[in-house]
Amino acid sequence: MFGLGILDTIKIGAGAVAGAIVGGALFYTIGHWRGVDEGRALERTASLQRSMDAIKERNDTNAKVNDLDDPGLCAALGGKWVPDTKLCE
């Protein structure tokens, strides 16, 4: 038809298969990289949110502790306030 022999047809077919394999590997690799990048971005966002939550919780705790007087702080820490010596035991 086009003057191609059986070996030429096999060579063209093998080249097409090899090209498809290389192209598929290339697209798979690019897709994998994008997926990894998206995963990193999601984890970075989640980590930042956890840090912000921990800071907020710490600020709330600090505010409660700052509102305590000496006897209240002693009691909160499980001690017993001695008014005569003004010491926490």
Image: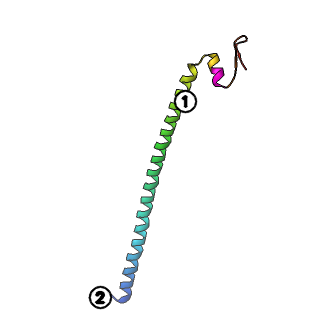
The majority secondary structure of the magenta stretch comes to helix
Say whether residue 25 is magenta. Answer: no
Q: Nearer the viewer, residue 61 or 14?
A: 61
- Quadrant in the picture for the N terminus: bottom left
Say whether residue 74 is magenta. Answer: yes
In the picture, residue 11 is in which quadrant?
A: bottom left
Amino acid marked by disc 2: Gly
Amino acid marked by disc 1: Arg
Determine the residue positioned at 40% across, 79% down.
14
Crowd rating for badge 2 (residues with CA inside 10 Å; few <14, some 14–19, many 20+)? few
Q: Secondary structure at mark 2?
A: loop
State the image coordinates of residue 28 (x, y, percent, origin top left).
Answer: 43, 63
Which residues lie in the magenta part? 73-77
Label 1 sits on residue: 58
Label 2 sits on residue: 3
Determine the residue positioned at 43% across, 69% down.
22
Residue projecting furthest to the left: 1
State the image coordinates of residue 81 (x, y, percent, origin top left).
Answer: 69, 17
